[in-house]
């Protein structure tokens, strides 16, 4: 299991392959969160979340390559993943 707290405009590699990814929005974001099944790049191939509100949660499953988050603008999110071996 990996857990990352993201508060800036950045690309963040969360984990390698995993079964489940939970993104929790801790503060309203005026921008986007791109969710990628990758270890490089910034092209969203799982989802693009635009202007999410505080308290919103997003769940995605079955990442083959890895969980990569690309946030635009200031953000306040927590990303949790569950290993594929569990």
Image (spheres, grey):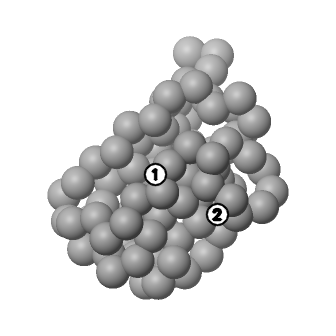
**Taking 25 as reference, is 4 left or right?**
right
Q: Is residue 6 above or below residue 24?
A: below
Query: Label 2, on which residue?
Result: 12
Q: In x, y percent, where is residue 64?
A: 71, 29
- Number of marks: 2
**Taking 53 as reference, is 79 left or right?**
right
The C terminus: image quadrant: top right
Q: Residues within 10 Å of mark 1 (few under 14, many from 20)?
A: many
Q: Is residue 31 above or below residue 53?
A: below
The N terminus: image quadrant: top right
Q: CA distance from mark 2 to mark 1?
A: 10 Å
Q: In x, y percent, where is residue 74?
A: 43, 84
Which residue is at 78% across, 50% downward? 39
Which residue is at 39% across, 50% downward? 23
Question: Looking at this view, is 26 or 42 the one in front?
Answer: 42
Query: Label 1, on which residue?
Result: 79
Q: Quadrant of residue 12?
A: bottom right
Residue 11 seen in the current view: yes
Residue 4 seen in the current view: no
Q: Residues within 10 Å of mark 2 (few under 14, many from 20)?
A: some
Ranked by sequence position, the earlier of labels 2 and 1 is: 2
Q: In x, y percent, where is residue 9?
A: 55, 81
Give residue 34's mark. Answer: none
Q: Is residue 4 above or below residue 67?
A: below
Which residue is at 32% across, 53% downward? 24
Q: Secondary structure at mark 1?
A: strand
Which residue is at 55% across, 52% downward? 35
The answer to the question of whether label 2 and label 1 lie on touching residues, with beta carbons closer than 8 A, is yes
Q: In x, y percent, where is residue 36?
A: 63, 49
Q: Secondary structure at mark 2?
A: strand
Residue lying farthest to the right in this orientation: 40
């Amino acid at each position: 299991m990996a857990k990352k707290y993201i508060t800036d405009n950045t690309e963040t590699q969360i984990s390698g392959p995993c079964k489940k990814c939970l993104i929790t929005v801790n503060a309203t974001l005026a921008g986007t969160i791109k969710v990628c099944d990758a270890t490089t790049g910034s092209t969203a191939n799982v989802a693009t979340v635009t202007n999410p509100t505080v308290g919103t949660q997003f769940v995605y499953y079955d990442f083959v390559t890895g969980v990569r988050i690309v946030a635009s603008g200031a953000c306040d999110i927590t990303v949790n993943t569950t290993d594929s071996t569990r």
